[in-house]
Image (cartoon, rainbow, N blue to C red):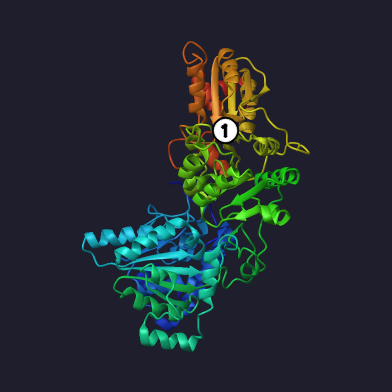
Amino acid sequence: MRMAEGHAPMKQTDFLSRIDMPADLRRVAQEDLVHVSDEVRQAVIEAVSQTGGHLGAGLGVVELTVALHYVFNTPDDKFIWDVSHQCYPHKALTGRKSRLNTLRTGGGLSGFTSRAESEFDPFGAAHSSTAISAALGFAAGRDFMKRDNQVVAIVGDGAMSAGMAFEGLNNVGSEKRRMVIILNDNHMSIAPPAGALSDYLTELRGFMPDEATRDKGIAEEGLPSFVDQPTMFDDLGVPYAGPFDGHDVDEMVRVLTAARDHDGPILLHVITRKGKGYAPAEASADCYHGVSKFNISDGKQDKAAPVAPNYAKVFADALISEAQRDERIVAVSPAMPDGSGLTKFGEMFPERHFDVAIAEQHCVTFCAGMAAEGMRPFAAIYSTFLQRGYDQVIHDVAIQKLPVRFAIDRAGMVGADGVTHQGAYDVAFLGCVPGMTIMAAGNEAELTDMVATSAAFDEGPIALRYPRGEGAGVEMPEQGRILEIGKGVVLREGSKIAILSYGARRQDALAAADKLAAMGLSATVADARFAKPIDDDLVKQLATNHELLISVEEGSIGGFSTLVYDSLARQGLDTGNARFVPIFMPDIYIDHDKPAAQVTAAGLDAAGIVVRVLDALGIDESRAVAAAGIGAE
């Protein structure tokens, strides 16, 4: 692994400077844990101010994390973090303190737990609601292996809205295995939590008594419930204790000690505050869930002025434009309204915007029901999260030919969020679904057209994918045009090479053609627009009129290139015509880094396309560059 990008060294502190591992923490006097907590919080703030990343969630669990490592014997005892973007304090206490300022940078620490990174990360997770199921698996494995370690699942309250969390709880309640579930209730997911469960937890929060009453209850019972009736967790067979103050580190130590020694499962309801201890985060609407680099003194984030509109904003503006003309259009998001650009849509059409919480499966089928009733639903889901609703896409939408519109954000490389959030697979897993129409925007203007096309399409499910970040800076239309289904477009005419781009790499394909032209190699560039139905006529034109056909996509093997292969074979063009060379994401997980660096690593930038063309033509790259009189990159 290459070295991480350089950052200023971490500031040394009184207690934290002497703590490298949890064993060091356990030698600290309990009354000093409050000072340790303050220093861990400061270390996290300093690190994230340099790198950007997830801040608010980690600040909210500082005292809880310190108490956990103080009480439990990690790494023998297992901590399973749900989502795990709150794990920065955990990393600071488990041998990674000196590298905190490399978080989410190339060659640096992951922004999530990672089995490859540390033995203190027994389970990696960057998608929600997996911790209870995984922890039960660890507990079952422990029991079969006749070991005596404890297993702890730390679950955010937002994660409890997903069905998988309840599937896990249901199983825990019947298995009765020894494990601890911590419900970290900060009353805040990425956006304000939605749904009846959030209201239920708010009701339970109201039962938290004052400190003296809590102290008395803990002293007498160890794991008291302050709720005056059985909770839903008790009814599921998982005893409930709490609510407790997650920012009182001494209280956490006493409660966790009792939970550590509890026989069977126990759920601890712990009240925390996202962004705790950093005023700008506490005052922010999202509690600084995810931030760019920032100035610690005032919290001002270092965000460069955009040179082109953000794709998510373009999608939202286009959808608003269509919704103004068609009252049947509704937008649905599984707990990501801001990230998907739908906050503004919700403000304009509050009755036509649905945040269904972290529940992608429900989101898809909910849209299917509305489509069956004659509505025109747009399911706005990140590519990496749509994976979680795949069965519903097939069973509830596609088989019934229901016109659900899938707006697939974050398609392709995503930068610092890394492998768990790469939008690599959607073309492959949707391309094999009968009756599915699939588009990808090559720039922000094309995205506007595809939103209009989706809104008008009632023949079945349709998906439009678009990348994270800024557009290409092209001129924007006043209103989206309805595209002819299954038809691409030739952007530039050439003679020797044909480059067929699908989606976000359109600008690189054009830039590659410029580089090839400088070498005396004439290239046609086309934008497929549609992966399914693919433009057979365009594929035939490119294959029969050029020596080499290159496809370029920011997706996995089995995606657009496979559909091009199929088109060639169906038309009898797979032999005796242009050689076909597909370019797609390599069959590896590309780790967190700047998006441009990830694209380069994947060979999907202009230089990478040129290299593949020259290799396919048997042309020595260095000689071609020298002959063209251009500098090697």
Position of residue 460 measured from the top left corner of the image (x, y, whole percent): 58, 35
Query: Would you identify the image quadrant in which residue 294 lies?
Result: bottom right
Position of residue 626 measured from the top left corner of the image (x, y, whole percent): 59, 23
Q: Is residue 327 above or below residue 128?
A: above
Label 1 crowd (10 A; few <14 / some 14-19 / many >=20)? many
Please tell me which residue lies in front, 534 or 364: 364
Count of marks placed on residues: 1
Q: Is residue 41 above or below residue 331?
A: below
Please tell me which residue lies in front, 119 or 281: 281
User: Secondary structure beneath disc 1?
Assistant: strand
Quadrant of the drawing holding the C terminus: top right
Which residue is at a point 60% across and 45% down the rendered structure image? Answer: 373
Kindly give the residue lying farthest to the right in the view shown: 478
Query: Would you identify the image quadrant in which residue 67 lies?
Result: bottom left
Which residue is at a point 43% across and 36% down the rendered structure image? Answer: 587
Please tell me which residue lies in front, 447 or 483: 483
Position of residue 221 measured from the top left corner of the image (x, y, whole percent): 36, 84
Q: Is residue 273 above or below residue 547?
A: below
Residue that numbered label 1 is attached to: 437
Kindly give the residue lying farthest to the front in the view shown: 373
Query: Does the image show residue 106?
Result: no
**For residue 310, side relative to residue 91 (left or right):** right
Query: Does the image show residue 166?
Result: yes
Residue type beneath disc 1: Thr
Which residue is at a point 45% across and 56% down the rendered structure image? Answer: 163
Position of residue 490 measured from the top left corner of the image (x, y, whole percent): 66, 22
**For residue 23, side relative to residue 517 (left or right):** left
Kindly give the residue lying farthest to the left in the view shown: 146
